[in-house]
Amino acid sequence: MLGKSEEKALKKLRKELRSGLYSFLVLSILEKEGELHGYAIRKRLEELSDGKLVPSEGALYDILKGLKKLGLLQDSWAEAGGRPRKYYSITEIGRRVLAQLRDEVKVIESVLEKLEGFE
Amino acid sequence: MSELVFEVFISLTLLAAGLLTFAFRKGRNYFIGFRIGYTYMSERAWKETNTFAGLFMVVFSILLLGLALAGVGILVFTLLMLAGVVLLTVAGFRIAKKAYEEEELSIEAPEKPSEKIEVNVRPYLAIQLLGLAAYLVLLAFLWNGLPGRVAIHFSASGEPDNFASKTLGTLLFPLVVYPLFLVMTYFLKEPAFAPLLRFSRRGWKAFAEFTTAMAIGIVVIDSLVLLYNAGYITSGWIDYSVWAFLVVTFGMMFRIFWARGEGT
């Protein structure tokens, strides 16, 4: 069991760690699968992480909005079941930025592997 | 009616509207509340938007009542009231849209979109802006020939029955009314503005053509009023143009309802 202050610190660091990671994962999913509905993006994250990395609706909304503002993804509406539904797709800039981020992630992976080697 | 009575009446009406909006915030209905596409389509959007709108109107109406009792002039009061209404509309729209889009992420949807309908309102906006520009150019040409007080309203028999100063009479109406059509056309891009039209290609086009025809019709009527005030035509021209405008308006309204039932 963690103490109250430890729990608070963990919550804060987890939030910081995940916010960038979610953006990276959302872009990766959209690059791989093409245009998707927000619900499907959330579902993919759930499937890929066995339910461990699932952003809340509010968090995913902010991530998608932030990525759109940066020009990394675009959205469009389509009708389904009598309701307007919003679909997202990655832009060319998004693909280029994602490629750069992949290099960063490789560096992080390599650092983590080395750190594990020290243990 | 004195200014004070008018200001107190407006404040109390707004207060009553705010209390009713707050009271009906939990259930969607067609009569009371912040009613736009997003709030009609989502219980959550309805609740969040109407909670905000109800509270905002109550607080704002009390502020207006205080200002009215403190003796604020009618012009300042009216401008503040309009600013409040615009703020309420913009903030309410944003809250409704955010609530709807957040809810979207938790409701199962087909992974890939079905047929999409692209709404391109740019040509309609361009035509409306050109109409406004044409009116302003005509006004500039006729300005020196216009009298100090101009006719702004005509009786059924075609005789002028209301007048205003040159600046107010020639600029106020176009600058207040034209943006309304521009805004209505622009918001067709939003699925929430008129969802039933938005998802029918014929529907949204009929609506955009309707707002554009209205805007151009008003440009024509206002231009004829300018020409009348400058002494180039008789008031009979305005009479005929208003009748023609009404016929076109009803025809296009019928067309929207017809197009709505046609689907894509």
Image (cartoon, rainbow, N blue to C red):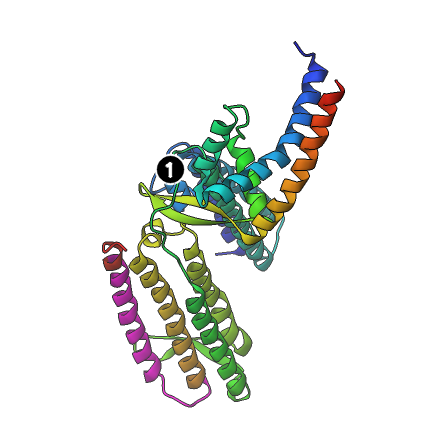
State left or right for residue A70 relative to residue B131. Answer: right
In the image, residue A5 sits, relative to residue B203, either above or below, namely above
Give the camera-side residue of B33 and B103: B103
Give the camera-side residue of B202 and A48: A48
Element class at badge 1: loop
**Which subunit holds the residue at mark 1?**
B
Give the camera-side residue of B212 and B204: B204
Q: How many numbered marks does the figure carry?
A: 1
Q: Which residues fall within the magenta stretch?
A: B229-257
x then y, percent, for residue A73: 53, 48
Q: Residues within 10 Å of mark 1 (few under 14, many from 20)?
A: many
| Quarter of the C terminus of chain A within the rendering | top right
Residue with the mark numbered 1: B109
x then y, percent, for residue A13: 69, 26
| Residue B163 on the magenta span | no
x then y, percent, for residue A101: 64, 42
Judge whether residue B19 can be spotted in this image.
Answer: no
User: Which of the 4 image quadrants contains residue B159?
Assistant: bottom left
| Residue B230 on the magenta span | yes
| Quarter of the N terminus of chain A within the rendering | top right
